[in-house]
Every structure is written in structure tokens, then in C-alpha cells.
Image (cartoon, rainbow, N blue to C red):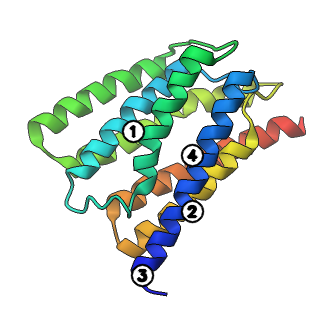
Amino acid sequence: MKTENLKKMFAIITILGMLVMMIWYGFSVVTGIARPTISTWVIFCFAVSFSFLTYRKSKKPSLLDNIANVIDFVFCWSITVVIIFFGKNIRFSLNIIEIFCFISILFIVIFWLKTKSHENANIFLQIIMVIAYFPMFYQLWNATENYEPIFPWIANLTAGLSNIFAAILAKNKLAIIYSARMVIMLSILLFLILRIKSL
């Protein structure tokens, strides 16, 4: 199979996986199964949005190579809107890590606008998105009851794995970094969810 066809196949798998995640997680929020922290999702919205913008300005801005970032942009904003308007028992907590993430995103955007260093700004945003997971990890580590549905996150991990194969085929550095960050963080998240289920 030709490389372009493989990339298209992986892109379709990525899109399907993330659509499953978006619909299933949104339903879980509306029904009260998932009880996410709104501030964490707002951070993801801004970080993913600027990640997408800096990626599109980079040297290799192919949407096919990094379709996960494109869908993430729609996914994060859609879920945040669902949480705000339809969520039940939603938590709003702004801890020191989240404040740091908000301020860091602001500084990265200023850095990007002043230097036009698209690649560096994109990489810095991936670091912020790694840090943004830690409040969620902390809550899951200390939880005795699970408020995160497992199957949507499995679908999202499948999408991340598919996207990383497309990115490797394209030899697209930013797409590889985005996908690798996604896969590592989602793997840790799933481990913590499974840990609660085993308690």
C-alpha cells in the first residue's frame, strides 16, 4: 500500500476514534456519569487552539499528517460547551498548576507573536498540555470512586496511536510530538482509571 493511502487510512481511524470519544464523553457529561473539572478543559481548549494555529504556520502544516490536532480543536471546544451548559455536578477548581498553565499559555502566545517561531511555540504548548493533565492525574490517584468513563478514553488513545503512525510516515516532527504526547498522557490516564476500578 502506498504511503499516501496509508496516511489516509490512519487519518480515517483517527477521526473515527476521536468522534467516538467526543460523542460518548459528551453523553457521559450530560447524564452525569463523567464529572470533569471545567478549568482543565478550558486550558485544553486554549492550548489545543494555539497548538493548531502554530502548527498551521509551521514548515510542514499538512492537516492529514496531524489530523488529531484538527479534531482535538473541535473536540475540546465541543466538550467544554457541553460541560458548561449540560454538565451535572461539575467541579470548578483553579489550583496552582492550572493558574501556571493559563499564564504560560499567555506568555507562549506573546512569544509566538513577537518571534514568529512557530515550531518552538508549538513544542512549548505540548509541554503545557502535559502539565495540564497533572491535576486530573492527582484527582484520579486519590479518588475512591471513578467519574471518568473508560471507553471514550480508549477510543481517544486508539486515535492517538493511529495519528502517530501517519506522522511517522510523513516524517512530520510536530505531528509526531503532538501524537506522542497524546498517547503517553492518555496511557497514564487509563492506567489511573483502571487502578480505581481495581480498588
Label 1, label 4: how far apart the Cα atoms are: 14 Å
Q: Which residue is mark 4?
A: 185
| Disc 1 residue crowd, few under 14, some 14–19, many 20+, Cα 10 Å | many
Q: Secondary structure at mark 1?
A: helix
**Viewer-proximal residue among 75 and 101:** 75
Q: Nearer the observer, disc 3 or disc 4?
A: 3
Q: Residue at x 74, y 21 (%)?
A: 32
Residue 173: percent from left, percent from top: 33, 63
Q: Which residue is mark 1?
A: 48
Q: Secondary structure at mark 3?
A: helix
- The disc labelled 3 sits on which kind of residue? Thr
| Disc 2 residue crowd, few under 14, some 14–19, many 20+, Cα 10 Å | some
Mark earlier in primary sequence (1, 4): 1
Q: Secondary structure at mark 4?
A: helix
Q: Is residue 80 left or right of residue 3?
A: right
Mark earlier in primary sequence (4, 2): 2
Residue 79: percent from left, percent from top: 54, 30
For residue 96, say whether it is visible: yes
**Viewer-proximal residue among 6 and 128:** 6
Q: Which mark is residue 13?
A: 2
| Disc 4 residue crowd, few under 14, some 14–19, many 20+, Cα 10 Å | some
